[in-house]
Image (tube, grey):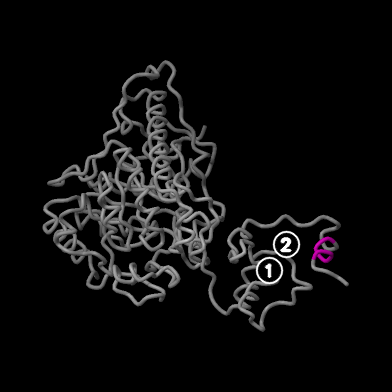
Amino acid sequence: MVTADKLVKAEDGGAGAKAPDREKEKPVKKDGTRETCQDCGGSTGEAAAYDPEYARTQTDARYMDEIHEMAVKGQSIIAAMGTQMPMPGWDDILFLGAQLNPMPLDEHAPVKTETIIGKHAAKPMVLDHPVYISHMSFGALSRETKTALSRGSAMARTAMCSGEGGILPEEKAAAYKYIFEYVPNQYSVTDENLREADAIEIKIGQGTKPGMGGHLPGGKVTPEIAAIRNKPLGQDVISPSRFPGIDTKEDLKALVDRLRLVSGGRPIGIKIAAGRIEKDLEFCVYAGPDFITIDGRGGATGASPKIIRDSTSVPTIYALYRARKYLDQAGCGAQLVITGGLRVSSDFAKALAMGADAVAIASAALMAAACQQYRICGTGMCPVGVATQDEKLRSRFKEDAAAQRVANFLRVSLEEIKTFARITGHDNIHDMDADDLCTVSREISEFTNIRHA
């Protein structure tokens, strides 16, 4: 009998093909194994499934797995986490260590790290750290994960974001500073909640699915989450792709002004996906927010159409450069927050040097807590209890330990950012600039203000 394995070896000249990275994105079954090409859709017993005797599980044929899955299931592929497609990387940017002109600071010299969001707001948000935890909803994440992230961020004296699913009371209570996400569905929007937040961010879009609303799979919509969101139990929750009533820049300004008034002068932010950056920033600047967040290509999500995630948004490095340039030329005093694929202290420090006032992280914080990058967030089957509402799986998540790990990661990252400041001759992390950087990438050198090495 000719088996799929023999076919692979015969066609590859005796050597099996290397499994593509997209293998990691196939669903995990309840027994812990991943669906292979021959049984994509087979778990539902569909007659359209391919004959397993001849189906290949290892191939470098471009998009064959995706085509097979769509052909069998008759629907778009929903994927988690960030794209695995190639893009410009932070590792191609390097720091220029100071020697004589300028000279570095002593390794124990004090370095200022205070980060202010809303410098001109009536009630600015002051952090000890330039990196904070980005928006991830209760629903996409478990209660325990959200609370651990908040506790860890508080230990590091930085901010925690609500995500678009509304306010989780335990998370808010644990936070040092709390940024509430204002979304079209207006979850948890009350005058009291707006006044109690430390900052409010209007979500226009996100980098992994620009032009689309959030997507919470029905398997994660428990009675509690259904109640918070006022949605039917067990049904997918799809958020609107845009705000009703915001059709002009004047409409956006009216919303910013209203939130500022109702909140008593809290910093008001606007978050956009990195697309038509300058045109979108024209609207943002007119609206007069206290901070603007740019979400670049490379960021992640709990559930998104794979084809959209892999085919949209400007890479974060270019988006940051263009946004900083536009805001400076416009004379805009809003703080610029960058997010989308930044992982470690060197990424954070480079972003600060490129002009970001702060960095928001999501995947890196989840990894610090417990995430093992199974890339199955949307299935609700996260085996470490991070991206699930299943009680048995959630019991595996150790909240106290996770909170401490998040705090440790943030603290170490801050010390390393301070080291980058010292070696470039600065006593304030916000004084680093593009003159402290070089790149080994001709592309990055050509399309940013970072010189080639």
Quarter of the image for residue 218 reads bottom left
Foreground residue, 88 or 240? 240
In the figure, 41 relative to 151: above or below? below
Residue 375 is tagged as: none
In the figure, 294 relative to 32: above or below? above
Q: What's the distance in space between the residues labelled 2 and 1, CA to CA?
A: 10 Å
Foreground residue, 20 or 159? 159
Q: Residue at x 67, y 72 (%)?
A: 39
In the figure, 327 relative to 162: above or below? above
Residue 35 can be seen, yes or no = yes
10 on left or right of 136: right
Q: Amino acid at mark 1?
A: Cys
Mark 2 lies on residue: 59
Q: Residue at x 33, y 31 (%)?
A: 429
The spot of residue 4 in percent (x, y) is 79, 68
Which of the image's four quarters has the N terminus? bottom right
Q: Residue at x 30, y 32 (%)?
A: 113
Q: Residue at x 79, y 57 (%)?
A: 16
442 on left or right of 246: right
Magenta span contains residue 134? no
User: Which residue sits furthest right?
Assistant: 1
The spot of residue 31 in percent (x, y) is 62, 64
> Would you say the residues marked 2 and 1 are in contact, meaning their CB atoms lie under 8 Å apart?
yes
Mark 1 lies on residue: 37
90 on left or right of 272: right
Point out the stretch of residues depicted in magenta: 5-9
Q: Amino acid at mark 2?
A: Thr
* Disc with the residue nearer the chain's start (2 vs 1): 1
Helix, strand, or loop for circle 2?
A: loop
Q: Main secondary structure of the magenta part?
A: helix
